[in-house]
Image: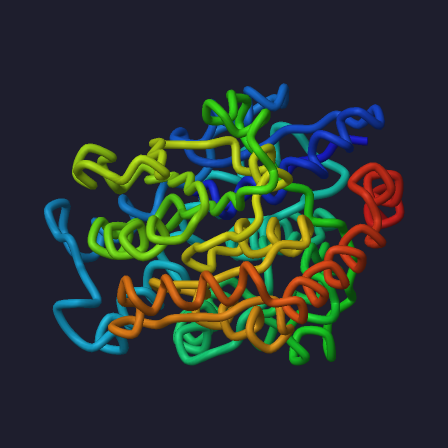
Amino acid sequence: MRLIFTSLVSHGHLYPLLPLAVAARDAGHEVLFATGDEMLPVVEKAGLAVETAGFGQREAFATILGPDARPSAADAPPESFYPVIGEVFGNVLPRRFVADLTPLFERHRPDLVVYESGNAGGAIAARLAGIPAIGHGFGRFSPGEIIDVINGRLADYAAEVGFAGVDLQSFGDPVVDICPESVQSPDFLAGANRIPLRPVGWSEPGDLPAGVAGRDKSRPLIYLTLGTAFGDEDVLKRAIGGLARIDADVVVAAGPTVDPAGLGDVPGNVRVEAWVPQADLLPHVDLVVHHGGSGTTLGAFGAGLPQLVLPQGADQFTNAEAVVTAGVGAQLIGGDATADAIHERARELLTGDAVRGAARKLAEEVAAMPSPAEVARRLPEFAG
């Protein structure tokens, strides 16, 4: 069977699809992955064939704001930027992906398209080509005002190409859902044709930071990251200041948006890296302090780890709320995320039996979800 996977051009949207894509290839299917040039090397390292489709979010925003614009929620109320976000994700990116995927589908004629749920262009292009398709979530489906704005613009584009009134949450397709049911959005669960899939962390190959693998396990290890898209030097400095005062070791992944050198000298129990193989690191960790990105949130769910969430944007706020509601962590938002507050909450989470028990229970739920290999065996039934 010929399969084409497609995702938006970012780590957080692409990584979640790779386990199923690789499992499908290992099951003997012909797999092609279509995304923007920036992410193609990541896919090639997974051993998958690639084709270019779409472009990155920076380029998409530049088509509206100009090449030198650097919009920031700090410059104005966040809701004032919603129309631009709606235009980018509800119109600019879908149009570009449809334009690029349409000839690609004509050349390869896949039996099934697997599109990442944030990539509406993949869903629409498959519909236009008459090819069966399924969605693939990248985390928890998070309703909210910004999603309503995006869907409003997307509805206009869908109507323009002949799909007025289509269900914009799933386009009527089955959806591979990597979020444990107990923490998934009730609104999504009520209407989705859900294909559960265990969230399997994906990291590019690399070595763990020195000292992690053979460390003294009686001393806690804290992992601090703000992800690949919303890194903030000031927030990281405050978090480092608070966490370093705990009798623990701290590994910091600065990510591509923060220069590690900008964090200055750090205490001796803190190690700063530009990047770490997160999926390999989490089994060694006792607490994750992070931004609330889907990959890190679900990775911590699977590893059974308490979480302190410092949300910065996008769906991170609803992910943080889900963490708190599930009893597996705490959140600190905006000005509340002081060094002192981070210190106190992290200490509480490292010693809280109830939180650790809830985290272990959630990890058991994740472990019971179908594996990528199991879901890959089901893919032919969705090809029609």
| Residue 123 seen in the figure | no
**Rendered view: 207 above or below 200:** above
Q: Residue at x 83, y 24 (%)?
A: 28
In the image: residue 328, left or right of residue 75:
right
Q: Position of residue 166 (x, y in %)?
A: 61, 72
Query: Residue 26 location in percent, x, y?
Result: 79, 24
Q: Tell whether 157 sits left or right of 376.
A: left
Q: Position of residue 233 (x, y in %)?
A: 22, 49
* Colour approach in the figure: rainbow
Q: Quadrant of residue 346?
A: bottom left
Residue 123, image quadrant: bottom right
**Residue at (30, 74) in percent of width and height:** 336
Q: Residue at x 53, y 64 (%)?
A: 349
Residue 324 spot, x, y in % from top left: 55, 74
The answer to whether residue 243 is visible is: yes
Q: Nearer the viewer, residue 157 or 376?
A: 376
Residue at the location (74% across, 67% down)?
181
